[in-house]
Amino acid sequence: MPYSTLDDFEPLSTIGSGSYGTCKKIRRKKDGKIYAWKEMDYGSMTESEKQMLVSEVNLLRELKHKHIVRYYDRIIDRSNTTIYIIMEFCDGGDLATLISRCRKDGIYMEEQFVWKMLIQMTLALQECHRRKNGKAVLHRDLKPANIFLDIDKNVKLGDFGLARVLHHETSFAKTYVGTPYYMSPELVNNMSYNEKSDIWSMGCMLYELCSLHPPFTASNQSELNKKICMGEFNRIPIRYSSDLNEVIAKLLRVEVHRRPGIEGILRDQRIQRQQQLLE
Ligand code: ADP
Ligand code: MG
């Protein structure tokens, strides 16, 4: 879909507004196909932030995988300094919404659904972490709100990198207005972000899908940091199998070298069994 213009699309409705713009459901006029776009005002960005945004968007365009939200194109409207990022529309909502609904209704998710999320998130991350012609793409902002579902409840990992670009801008402070429950021990200790930090976040997310609360909670940051570095958490609810409990616990190993990478996860017998069931 090269060289689209604003005129090629018709906005249908606003899906929501985020920290850096608005997301709308849109329709391509020529064939009626539905997409989503993200509108971001780059008017107040510095030249280098804009450069980063451009290179990030170019990178997103290369990530093509069935479990990653597909980015199609971007349109730049100089008259109102807005960039429109056109992407796949996910009509199954996101995991954050699903978790809060379950918590409110007092129901747990099916174990099979959790395995499916685990496997599909792993496959999406594999695509990012093993990129051959360049550095691994790290998500850096894995959280339930960034995991979308399609109509068949398949994972679509979204909000790649953009988060990162924009965090540079108004920054960190803004991003972490909420408590960073998914921050890995190495980040707590000011070490650099790496592939294993994405694995930790995925472990936190799966734990929360089962327990309906994060593995580590505290009322202030320093207490949370302490708990994260201790790495102790309660078992996920007893209704879930010990296989699932063990796999999640493996993703939440405090020492980076003991925590599996993507390939290690995919070699796990328990995961391989579940993968066969899914096919
Ligand atoms: P933030 O992530 O900062 O909250 P976003 O702009 O990413 O803000 O998202 C705003 C809203 O749009 C959220 O409710 C999100 O779930 C939804 N959304 C984002 N991307 C898509 C998409 N590709 N398909 C459907 N809904 C989306
Ligand atoms: Mg988002």
Image (tube, grey):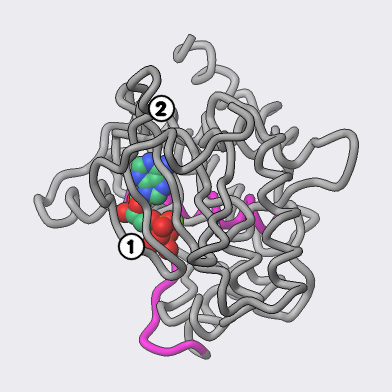
Local packing at callout 1 (Cα closer than 10 Å; few below 14, some 14-19, many 20+) is: few
Q: Amino acid at mark 2?
A: Asn
Q: Quadrant of ligand 2?
A: bottom left
SS for tag 2? loop
> Which residue is at a point 64% across and 28% down the rendered structure image?
64
SS for tag 1? strand
Picture coordinates of residue 256 (x, y %)? 75, 59
Q: Nearer the viewer, residue 120 or 32?
A: 32
Q: Is residue 263 covered in magenta? A: no
Confirm if mark 2 falls within 8 A of ligand 1: no
Q: Amino acid at mark 1?
A: Ser
Picture coordinates of residue 235 (x, y %)? 40, 54
Q: CA distance from mark 1 to mark 2?
A: 24 Å
Q: Is residue 206 covered in magenta? A: yes
Q: Which residue is mark 2?
A: 154
- Residue 74, quarter of the rendered image: top right
Picture layout, residue 134 above or below residue 126: below
Query: Seen from this angle, which residue lies furthest left?
Result: 105
Picture layout, residue 207 above or below residue 118: below
Q: Is residue 195 left or right of residue 207?
A: right
Confirm if mark 1 falls within 8 A of ligand 1: yes
Main secondary structure type of the part rendered in magenta: helix
Q: Nearer the viewer, residue 250 or 205?
A: 205
- Which disc, if any, is residue 17? 1
